[in-house]
Amino acid sequence: MSNKKSYFSFEDPFGIAIEFQATSLQQAMVIKKKKALEMGIPKEAFELKTIRKKPSQNV
């Protein structure tokens, strides 16, 4: 069984983005929920934008 990680990027309607590594979409959804809670934003506000092998270069 492979343990490859991908970078998942989520964005809310106001343009707030979060990106992190996870091994599966299920794990990404759990991480998204935790990060949204930390930010005080409902997890439902974030939509999946991209899944990639390398982090985005947006700085």
Image (cartoon, rainbow, N blue to C red):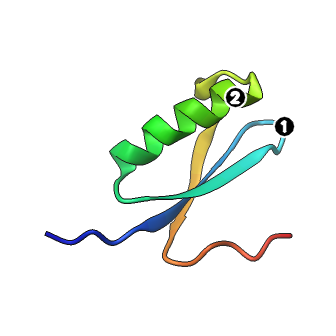
Quadrant in which the N terminus is drawn: bottom left
Q: Amino acid at mark 2?
A: Glu
Label located before the other in sequence (1 or 2): 1
The residue lying at 44 percent from left, 36 percent from top is: 30
**Label 1 packing within 10 angstroms: few (<14), some (14-19), many (20+):** few
Q: Nearer the viewer, residue 49 or 36?
A: 36
Q: Position of residue 58 (x, y in %)?
A: 80, 70
Q: Position of residue 26 (x, y in %)?
A: 34, 43
Q: Which mark is residue 38?
A: 2
Give the secondary structure at mark 2: helix
Q: Based on the displayed image, in which of its 4 quarters is residue 22 positioned?
A: bottom left
Q: Based on the displayed image, in which of its 4 quarters is residue 42 positioned?
A: top right
Q: Amino acid at mark 1?
A: Phe
Q: Is residue 45 visible?
A: no
Q: With respect to residue 29, does 6 lie above or below?
A: below
The residue lying at 75 percent from left, 30 percent from top is: 39
Quadrant in which the C terminus is drawn: bottom right
The residue lying at 75 percent from left, 22 percent from top is: 40
Left or right, 20 with respect to 26, comes to right
The residue lying at 77 percent from left, 36 percent from top is: 13
Q: Position of residue 33 (x, y in %)?
A: 54, 31
The answer to whether the residue labelled 1 contacts the one labelled 2, judged by CB atoms less than 8 Å apart, is no
Give the secondary structure at mark 1: loop
Disc 1 designates what residue? Answer: 14
Q: Is residue 18 visible?
A: yes
Q: Based on the displayed image, in which of its 4 quarters is residue 24 positioned?
A: bottom left
Q: With respect to residue 19, does 51 lie above or below?
A: below
Q: Nearer the viewer, residue 6 or 45?
A: 6
Query: Label 1 vs label 2: CA separation?
Result: 17 Å
**Label 2 packing within 10 angstroms: few (<14), some (14-19), many (20+):** few
Left or right, 30 with respect to 50, comes to left
Q: Nearer the viewer, mark 1 or mark 2?
A: 2
